[in-house]
Amino acid sequence: MDVPSQIASIEDLERWKEDGLRALAPGARKVTVGMATCGLASGAKAVFDVLTEELGKGAPDVMITKTGCLGFCQMEPIIEVFQPGKPRLLYKQVTAEKAADIAASIISGKINKEDVFCTIDGEDKEGAAKTGLRGVPRLEDIPFYAKQEKIALSRCGRIDPESLAEYIATGGYFTLWKTFTAMTPDAVIAEVEHSGLRGRGGAGFPTGRKWQLTRKASGSPKYIVCNADEGDPGAYMDRSLLEGDPFAVLEGMTLGAFAIGAQQGFIYVRDEYPHAVENLLNAIAQARAHGLLGGNIMGKGFSFDVRLIRGGGAFVCGEETALIASIEGRPGEPKQRPPYPAEKGLWGKPTNINNVETWADVPWIIAHGADAFRSVGTETSKGTKVFSIVGKINNTGLIEVPMGLTLREIVYDIGGGIPDGKKFKAIQTGGPSGGCIPEQLLDLPVDYESLTKAGAIMGSGGMIVMDEDTCMVDVARYFLDFLKEESCGKCAPCREGIDRALEILERICRGKGKDGDLDTLEATAQMMKGFALCALGTTAPNPLLSTIRYFRDEYEAHIRDKRCPGAVCRDLIHFRIDPEKCTGCMLCGKVCPQGAIKGERKKPHTIDEARCIKCALCYEVCKYDAIVKE
Amino acid sequence: MTTLAIDGQTVHAEPGMTVLEAAQRAGIRIPTLCHHEGIEPYGACRLCTVEITDGARTTLQASCCLPAREGLVVRTDTPAVTQGRKLLFQLLLARCPNVPAIRRLAADWGVHDTPFSPKDEDCVLCGLCVRACAALMGPEAIAFRGRGVSREVGTPFDFPSETCVACGACTYVCPTGSVQMEAQTAARLRKRVATERKCRYMLMGIVSSKLCPNDYDCPHCSYDQAMEFRFGTHPAFAVAAAKRSAGVVPAGIQEGGKDKR
Amino acid sequence: MDTAQIDKVVEQYGGDSSALVGILQEVQRREGYLPRKTLTRLSEKLDLPLSRLYALATFYRSFSLTPTGRHKVCVCLGTACHVRGGQAVLDRFERLLGVRAGGTTLDRRFTLETVRCVGCCSLGPVVRVNDETYARVRQDKLAQILTRFQ
């Protein structure tokens, strides 16, 4: 590799770019395996090993590399095959066996197009026919991807996240150079402000304004922080960004530090994200080694460095004052604001805290201009947002869409609807601070204000789809159970309020609900909204309030009729075997941990309700739908 | 001097005052539990929450942590405030049904019973003892541990403290009478040999040399009473003020302790 | 860890307050928990009250004050895993191992924990054993998973 070790000129960047382009579109063939957490959890390592072995023997000229998350997590492991001058081919759900087949097809040169999922940078239908790929869709035509627009995720799944050269080859660090040579800090802030970028961590505060406040605050030194404590269960946007494009976050932070006047930054990452930490540390080390982080960056006189801090396992540390406490070496207890961190943050100094996705958007905005960012989105919510769609949905994964797309488009067009022919019931957005949105509101555009008006919030972007087999009372109970463990305990409204609301909900789910419970729950919720110290406490009532608002009948069924319409709450449901459908295969009897199922071979079985613990294992394994849950 | 309106009344506040202090000064009642003059406000009990209108924005905020600013419009009696306060008292009553001080405070504000099932705690986690230990004397012998509903005050590993100086400030500030540190440390000090039985005023650094003449029965000690009389408050507050005058700032000491007013 | 090793960790991370959590994480990694003697030595070396370290050790879930098992079984109870049956998986592990979530088996082979979201939401229910992630786990396959970890 003949690139300058220290990058200090546009020519240096150009040489690194060439190097990166050679890696991205080499003269030789290349296979890339998705090795982010989802990929690894689905078996990508085995796929990587098989490819390495087989290609090593039969086609040693083929390069094998890895990449981050393409977003279609349902389809992992995913691999991409690159052949010079031809469209890139994507394969999905690759097993070790399939990997061997693919390796064989590369060695022989005979691609079996039936196995190919789609092409990237492929031709349209005519071109596809010419290249022998008739019928193979292009990535952008696949429903999951058709309505997406990538800004923050533009490099995820397209480059090797450990390669600085590939980052530079795709535009990285040219933006920083342009900023150092042609922009003032005020101009950078003006651009970010004009773009309309709002904090992507959930609160949606205008980013440019926050930067301005920090810049103007008195006190020195100033700090910037990247909040990577993504704690909402079901949300993993930040993890994928950090795993798939860590340099973008670093460059964004460097731009922010330049604009605000800070020399030191912190990246606070959840303890539960080891792979993200690894990729970040690698990126930091490389940036430092090549003059892109540390003293006199790019020889332009500006110094900025970052420290990686790992969280200790506390959801509340996603709240900015608790995060500050944690970095300062104290328990993550929030503090009342004002003063806001922009005025008095870390060690009492002005501190600008932004979410991972916000930082990742910044280089794009500076490179393409605020107007380009503004051209997408709604009146109040500009740009794109990354969401995770998970739960009872066909196409689970990570998506990036323009603000303003409707929930219906996300659930049905992108998400592919509800599996197993079940009915949609609700979509939960905003994690434990958010709410459940019912079917009648599916045409709401996704933007900050619309979701808040509906009783939910945008949050960090987790979207959990629920179907008819979900109990909404159980959902409220689940979130309060989560928050009870995560509450720091400092303030009485949150600590006592969550505990007692949960107590009541658990009673209701056990069939012991009383008249007046709903009133007490609502009064407790209202109190918490106004009296709690921090956003964990003030938003904790949201799941409860939104489910009462839209699904009151379910609460009443539990309380008055001791019935669970979703057939979830264990104490209120029964399992029985339909004698018409049971074939006597004896599988359920074998798996039942309590020995509660009796029956002879080929004769209908029965469940002894007294011994049944409602684990639902029989329901899971029965191939004949003979187990009835009601 | 800043001027603000509280419940329709014009109130004047001195620089550095909080909304709570301004209200108290004007004779307007706001309930508190974790508040103590001479200790930095903490904002844990939230009983002092009031409605604040600042320009166009109206929010609910804890008045103990809010600086009194010119033009603020404060209401302590709106439905959101009074209903929320009532619910909060009900939660506290359910947590500590057998603590007379809590029953009395709730009753003062019209709350006598609670819809929640009773526990039997005697600590309300106001944090005054912890804050006093850190801010006044400094040893941090007791601290919070755990989190959420299992949050508690205690010594590390529940071992008898090596660093407690038996100043008794924690016992003095505790609103429920649940802190026992003074008694525990006294019991530990009694086990020392005669020459090591330092009077707690020596341990606190107030006198340079004095041994205990009274078997650590501080509540019945004439020397102790004389000291409290001399300071007019708990000596720990005076120590903290003196340290600050000397330029030593313990963690979180509030500007304007009792001696300064 | 002996005194020299503890002191070395402090020197490595630096003695300022922002290094505290990192230092404790290092000790947790090496010892599998935070022994009282180590915390006491740290409090001396850093010149901080022991109560501060104890507060950190009991506030953050990454830390344990009692020895943990050789292998950590972590069941994800994030929302996506919850709607796909995560609770049932946890219940099953509790029965198989004979401990509740948070507990360690008597032979110190396994510690059973829960986590709310490891970020593999499309693949729920998810279980992590040490550094290995198992996706789409089924209740009747759990015993098999455990046999791989002696």
Image (spheres, coloured by chain):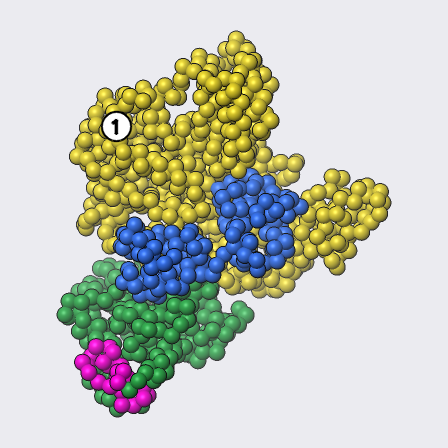
Chain colours: A yellow, B green, C blue
Q: Provide the secondary structure element on which disc 1 rests.
A: loop
Name which residue type carries label 1: Ser
Residue denoted by label 1: A5
Label 1 environment density (alpha carbons within 10 Å; few <14, some 14–19, many ≥20) = few
Q: Tell me which segment is drawn in magenta.
A: B195-219
Q: Is residue B204 left or right of residue A111?
A: left
Write the residue at 30% across / 44% down.
A307
Where's residue C69, x and y in %? 52, 55
* Quadrant assignment for the C terminus of chain B: bottom left
Residue A200 seen in render: no
Residue under the image location 65 percent in, 39 percent down? A422
- Residue A480 falls left or right of residue A3: right
Please tell me whether residue B211 belongs to the stretch shown in magenta.
Answer: yes
Query: What chain is tagged by disc 1?
Result: A
Q: Residue furthest left?
A: B246
Q: Quadrant of the N terminus of chain B?
A: bottom left
| Residue B185 in sight here | yes
In the rendered image, residue A246, in percent from the top left (x then y), is placed at 36, 35
Tell me if residue A345 comes above or below residue A140 in the rendering: below
Q: Is residue A373 above or below residue A209?
A: above
Q: Residue at x 41, y 47 (%)?
A: A270
* Camera-nearest residue between A60 and C63: A60
Q: Nearer the viewer, residue A587 or A105?
A: A105
Does residue B172 belong to the magenta stretch?
no
In this rendering, the count of numbered labels is 1
The part of the image, by quadrant, that contains residue A114 is: top right
On screen, residue A547 versus residue A205, left or right, reads: right
Q: Residue at x 56, y 18 (%)?
A: A104
What is the x, y in percent for residue A121? 45, 18
Residue at the far top: name it: A130
Q: Main secondary structure of the magenta part?
A: loop
